[in-house]
Amino acid sequence: MAIRVALLGTGNCGSLALRQLIEDDRFELVAVWVSSKDKIGKDAGELARLDVTTGVTAISDRDAVIAAGPDCAVYCAMGDIRPREALADVRALLEAGIDVVGSSPGFLEYPWGVIPDHTIEKVETAARQGNSSVFITGVDPGFVTDLLPLALASTCQSISQIRTMEIADYASYDGATVMFDVMGFGNEIGDLPFLYQPGMLSAAWGVGIRQLAAGLGVQVDEIRDSVEQEPAPEDFEVAVGTIKKGTVAAVRFVIEGMVGGEPVIVVEHITRLRGDLRPDWAQPAQEGGSYRVEISGEPSYVMDICPTSRNGDHNYAAILAAAGRIVNAIPDVIDAAPGIRTTLDLPLATGKGTYRPA
């Protein structure tokens, strides 16, 4: 019997998750929630950019989603700038007995030591009440900062450091909120958006750092972060608009999980809007962007992850990977014990059910 699913949020990640939910025979789509008024009433097939009519039309009423009786909700609504609302949505779904997988709120990926205990307990209480579970994931933080490095770490006899990296050109990324409000592109140099305010990077990527630490069996004493910004040498255009000369056109930030005074778990992001900016920073393994896992130990590793897609560039492919990781986790999350679930306690995901003839 197909798993009844609802989708909340049809942005970049949500629309790609929706495509799989419609096309994958393992699932039956019963509801779609949207935040934009101009999407209300549209068929899910149109929102997924598919040439099909599903008969499921978009609504903006969370209670109506719950009333549709899904077994699981795929939550891809924006959480970066509305964390309280996203958390309230997740709790309401869990209380109603609906399992949740999704991309936000990101701090639920591994919240212990990152958000207050009383906030965690409210989520756990909702899950116990509804006998439901929640799994939040993505790319980075996500499978690049937990699943892949832990898989490599399982072959090592000793490890002194794990570093994960995103090295990407975001010129084609069309999410204006993320580009301008979250990452601060187009801002004056030194004008830091909320993501770069003191402690925010450490909180946002602390979920990945602390989950890796738990997997390694080490205690992180401190998480510290730093940011560098690079100005545009001239005016130029990107997908979301014009980047003016002298405003932020490239960013490098580093988050370090310290153990005994040493940076043992490190997350580094290098984000450019033009490939020629800051050539001294790390370069991607493929044109446009890639991810990297580096393990210093015995043995040591460097693994480059180069997402591609027939339907888009590296940015599209990375978001597609996040959506796939989310949707493919649904069966295991439904079978999981109630509560907040993580990569550390879910079964190994194998891609079961995803084979399609070429």
Image (spheres, helix red, strand yellow):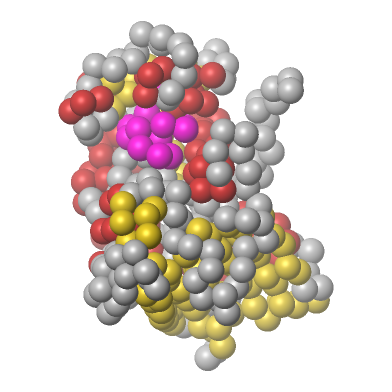
The quadrant holding residue 116 is: bottom left
The quadrant holding residue 263 is: bottom right
Q: Compared to 220, does 302 lie above or below?
A: above
Report x, y in % for residue 267: 52, 70
Q: Is residue 7 magenta?
A: yes
Start and end of the magenta stretch? 3-17
Question: In the rendered view, does 74 fall on the left or right side of 258?
Answer: left
- Judge by depth and name the residue closer to the eye, 204 or 233: 233
Residue 123: in sight, yes or no?
no
Q: Compared to 247, does 106 lie above or below?
A: above
- Quadrant location of the N terminus in the rendered image: top right
Q: Is residue 283 magenta?
A: no
Q: Residue at position x 53%, y 68% from top?
A: 276
Report x, y in % for residue 91: 28, 41
Q: Compared to 85, does 72 lie above or below?
A: above
Q: Compared to 100, does 343 lie above or below?
A: below
Q: Residue at position x 43%, y 23% from top?
A: 49
Q: Residue at the front extreme?
A: 234
Residue 290: in sight, yes or no?
yes
The quadrant holding residue 61 is: top left
- Judge by depth and name the residue closer to the eye, 220 or 251: 251
- Quadrant location of the C terminus in the rendered image: top right
Report x, y in % for residue 52: 45, 11
